């Protein structure tokens, strides 16, 4: 079998795992003409000249479960709200917690859903539910939202079209659509993408690639003679796409260090801030879905301090991402989705923490197809809170599947489309209903 580590010597090697991951992520990528401007200081130097841009998604994933009361749904002055204060946003009558002053100024570009309800209170199961729109099923792995977006339109960049930055415990997967739609994982953009740049001269590199491709082709030819299934192997295409990625100028989109301080600084000097800035670059070169993860939200103890600490990283980065997408003319074709696997309980536990709460929490959407300044749903304050019937405490509740159907509708994917799983089982992309109040 083709071993990419043979491309270079022991000291100057390409990681086999990294190259195969790149290959898998790039497997169905269409070529994109090199339209990168040379001016390093130009914020649009990665720009796509095609005016009919495909729709894209940026998922800001708040791993652990952010508290709605310390972020998008404050209830100040009572037992439920705790010590949080409310501040005005750029939309009249909509308030955020005082932990999100910068994002509050972007509310006029977004829609807020305060009544998301789910049935999963376990981290792993709830993550699966939010990212796929389905509850876990032992007989089937559902594709994540990013995989569906990439599957819907195969056009894109030379680099993987589905990217996960700072992947957490459950990076997005292709599910029954295939591993080629799994997210390509990278970590802090302060560091270069590992193992994609050869450390030998071009002539030596080209010779090694040619020799190894001959070896790989010979082995696959022998396999085809012995195993009829092997004729479906896309090894040549996969390898070529990986090699295209390795030589593409679009790899520069991962590198935020070359941007001016005036562009970098508003995002914050954190891995999450750099991830959000890289996400804008990646969307601009044709990546279809970028997921950026921020942990630190699982506040079973010291809820207010933990939520506040997480918001200090989240707020400037999220607000700057929306602003920069708008400045680069990308927000009309890019949907920003903000949320975690569930919310936190209205009550505090004995250690001043909030526990898991899927019975009414918040998500924020901004960008293409979303009604600016829209608000859907509400949760009650102390006077109207019924601890015996959690499900009765939410006005205009929506299911997680409804959120997925709304996202698909916004980016031009029909949520009622049926696909066949590998075993011939028909599956709707979503079993939800779009939330019309937040769609433009």
Image (cartoon, rainbow, N blue to C red):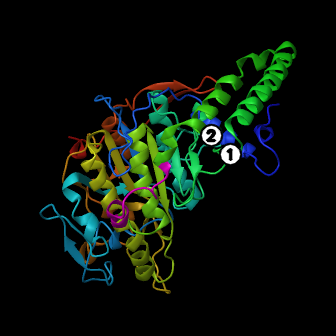
In the image, residue 295 sits, relative to residue 247, either above or below, namely below
**Looking at the picture, how far across and down is residue 271, in whole percent?**
49, 64
Point out the residue furthest to the left here: 92
196 on left or right of 385: right
264 on left or right of 15: left
Residue with the mark numbered 1? 18
SS for callout 1: helix
The quarter holding residue 410 reads top left
- Within-10-Å neighbours for mark 2: few <14, some 14–19, many 20+: many
Nearer to me, 240 or 74: 240
**Looking at the picture, how far across and down is residue 322, in whole percent?**
30, 54
Question: Residues at badges 1 and 2 in contact (C-beta under 8 Å)?
Answer: yes
Tally the marks. Answer: 2
Nearer to me, 295 or 328: 328
Q: Is residue 36 visible?
A: yes
234 on left or right of 168: right
Q: Residue at x 64, y 35 (%)?
A: 23
**Looking at the picture, how far across and down is residue 229, in whole percent?**
77, 18
Query: Quick check: is 69 in the magenta stretch?
Result: no
Residue with the mark numbered 2? 22
Query: Quick check: is 259 in the magenta stretch?
Result: yes
Nearer to me, 114 or 10: 10
Q: Which residues are magenta?
A: 254-266
The quarter holding residue 179 reads top right
**Looking at the picture, how far across and down is residue 313, in whole percent?**
41, 70
Give the spatial CA distance, label 1 vs label 2.
6 Å
Q: Is residue 117 visible?
A: no
The quarter holding residue 182 reads top right
Q: Quadrant of the N terminus?
A: top right
In the image, residue 198 sits, relative to residue 77, either above or below, namely above
Q: Quadrant of the C terminus?
A: top left
């Amino acid at each position: 079998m083709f071993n990419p580590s043979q491309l270079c010597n022991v000291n100057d090697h390409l990681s086999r795992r990294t190259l195969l991951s790149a290959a898998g992520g790039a497997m169905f990528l269409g070529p994109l003409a090199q339209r990168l401007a040379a001016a390093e200081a130009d914020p649009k130097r990665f720009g796509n000249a095609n005016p009919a841009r495909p729709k894209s998604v940026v998922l800001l994933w708040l791993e652990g479960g952010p508290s709605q009361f310390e972020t998008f749904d404050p209830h100040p002055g009572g037992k439920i709200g705790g010590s949080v204060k409310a501040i005005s946003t750029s939309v009249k009558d909509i308030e955020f917690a005082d932990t999100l002053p910068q994002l509050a100024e972007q509310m006029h570009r977004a829609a807020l859903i305060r009544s998301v309800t789910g049935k999963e209170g376990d981290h792993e199961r709830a993550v699966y539910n939010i990212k796929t729109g389905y509850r876990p099923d032992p007989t089937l792995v559902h594709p994540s939202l990013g995989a569906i977006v990439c599957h819907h339109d195969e056009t894109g960049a030379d680099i993987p079209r589905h990217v996960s930055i700072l992947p957490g415990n459950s990076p997005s997967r292709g599910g029954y659509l295939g591993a080629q739609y799994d997210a390509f994982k990278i970590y802090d953009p302060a560091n270069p993408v590992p193992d994609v740049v050869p450390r030998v001269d071009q002539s030596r590199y080209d010779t090694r690639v040619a020799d190894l491709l001959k070896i790989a082709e010979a082995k696959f030819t022998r396999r085809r003679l012995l195993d009829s299934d092997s004729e479906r192997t896309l090894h040549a295409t996969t390898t070529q796409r990986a090699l295209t990625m390795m030589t593409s100028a679009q790899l520069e989109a991962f590198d935020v260090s070359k941007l001016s301080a005036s562009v970098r600084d508003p995002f914050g000097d954190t891995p999450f801030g750099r991830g959000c800035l890289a996400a804008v670059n990646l969307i601009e070169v044709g990546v279809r879905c970028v997921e950026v993860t921020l942990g630190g939200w699982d506040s079973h103890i010291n809820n207010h301090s933990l939520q506040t600490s997480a918001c200090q990283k989240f707020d400037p980065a999220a607000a700057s991402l929306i602003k920069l997408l708008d400045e680069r003319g990308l927000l009309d074709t890019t949907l920003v989705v903000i949320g975690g696997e569930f919310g936190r309980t209205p009550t505090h536990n004995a250690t001043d923490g909030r526990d898991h709460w899927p019975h009414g929490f918040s998500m924020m959407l901004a960008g293409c197809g979303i009604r600016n300044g829209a608000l859907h749903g509400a949760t009650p304050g102390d006077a109207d809170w019924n601890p015996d019937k959690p499900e009765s405490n939410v006005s205009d509740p929506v299911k997680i599947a409804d959120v997925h159907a709304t996202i698909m509708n916004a980016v031009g994917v029909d949520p009622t489309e049926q696909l066949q799983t590998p075993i011939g089982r028909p599956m709707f992309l979503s079993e939800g209903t779009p939330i019309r109040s937040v769609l433009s």
